[in-house]
Image: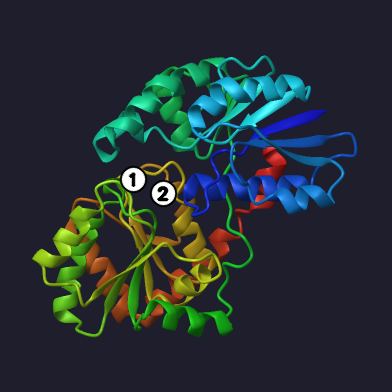
Amino acid sequence: MRIGVDLSAIQSTKSGVDWYTHRVIQEMMDLLAPDEQLCMFSNRETGFESEAAARPNVSVFRGSCTYQEPWRQFVLPLLLRRHRIDVCFFTNFVLSVAASCPMVLTIHDLSFRLFPRTHSLRNVIWARSLVPVSTRRGSHIIAVSNNTKLDLVRVMNVPSNKITVVYEGAPDEFNPKLNADDEEAMAHYGLIKPYVLFVGTLEPRKNLNFLIRSFDQVAKARPDVHLVLAGRRGWMAQAIFDELERRDLLGRVHITGYVRERYLPALYRQASAFVYPSLYEGFGLPPLEAMSSGTPVIVSRSSSLPEVVGDAGLYVNPLDTAELAKAMESILSDPELAASLREKGLRRAARFSWKKAARQTL
């Protein structure tokens, strides 16, 4: 069987879907049967070129088109036909509508339908134009959580038997073992302990102005505690900086920008707590990475996050600043609670793995 994969989702600075694509394909390459060929297609550098050169059953093909969606809709179908692909895997909401082979599509969430105001108008138009036809055109759909599956059935009328839930995972480098990178990472980003950590794209759906308002309450009582927001600037990120300035927190809240892959596990390990007050998530990879790192987590009581965290974290109403402030204060002031959450988190995280995700996907 010749399996195609659309790798055009992978960018040089990876976020959620990029990491999903990278990790699943990385593990999938080790699981191929002798009669299976993995053919990866993209309009840009993928990061898999050297590995493909060393594996006889893995290939990377580039198509010449600068813009991602025209490449996917007009160039990729020709490449799939030319390379005699039996089935193609699309990791990022949208597939090649004109492709002639069977296609499997991953849907991560339906925030573009349920929370359109947390996206740019351009992204909403793109998703609303192409995701519905993609779910109809696809032979099968992978949902990254039961919550996303239920949303697909409820909101987009996708038949339940057309959807398989495949959870994401956390790679081995996210673990509680301290190493030399920890001190180097702290120095590189100028971080001071103790700190509470958020990891993700700085955008409205992550509810960061709410987190800042909650942290302001903690900061008044605890002058030694800092907040670290780790991630690249997304759409409408300026509102976060405006909120910090209004509350005079610029010296207590540290925005790192995009964090190097090498340093991210260290930032999790060194944090006193990890906070993820997102309004809506299809899966919630950062809380899983935090639990794998032995860091106590606080998450919203919403969407897929309870599926991921289970009984291993504290839950808050994503609109109640006092409740989140109390949760942060509880972990910071109660070592026994922090230790209990750390132990539960490590046990919970062990249930998820990228190898398992790749096997189920394949």
In-front residue for pair 115/101: 101
**Residue type pointed to by label 2:** Leu
Disc 1 crowd rating (10 Å Cα; few below 14, some 14-19, many 20+) is: some
What residue is drawn where x is 48% and y is 53%?
A: 285
Point out the residue furthest to the left here.
Answer: 246
What residue is drawn where x is 34% and y is 83%?
A: 192
Position in image of residue 301 (x %, y %) = 32, 49
Asked whether the viewer can see residue 159, the reply is: no
The N terminus, quarter of image: top right
Point out the residue furthest to the right here.
Answer: 34
For the residue labelled by badge 2, is the local secondary structure a helix, a strand or a loop? helix
Q: Quadrant of residue 154?
A: top left
Left/right placement of residue 185 relative to residue 278 reads: right
Q: Which residue is mark 2?
A: 305
Left/right placement of residue 10 relative to residue 256 reads: right
Colouring method of the image = rainbow
Q: Which mark is residue 91?
A: none
| Depicted 36 relative to depicted 336: above or below | above
Asked whether the viewer can see residue 241, the reply is: yes
| Depicted 249 relative to depicted 37: above or below | below
The C terminus, quarter of image: top right
| Depicted 344 relative to depicted 20: above or below | below
Position in image of residue 208 (x %, y %) = 25, 56
In-front residue for pair 170/132: 132
Q: Quadrant of residue 59?
A: top right
| Depicted 133 relative to depicted 175: above or below | above
Left/right placement of residue 230 relative to residue 209 reads: right
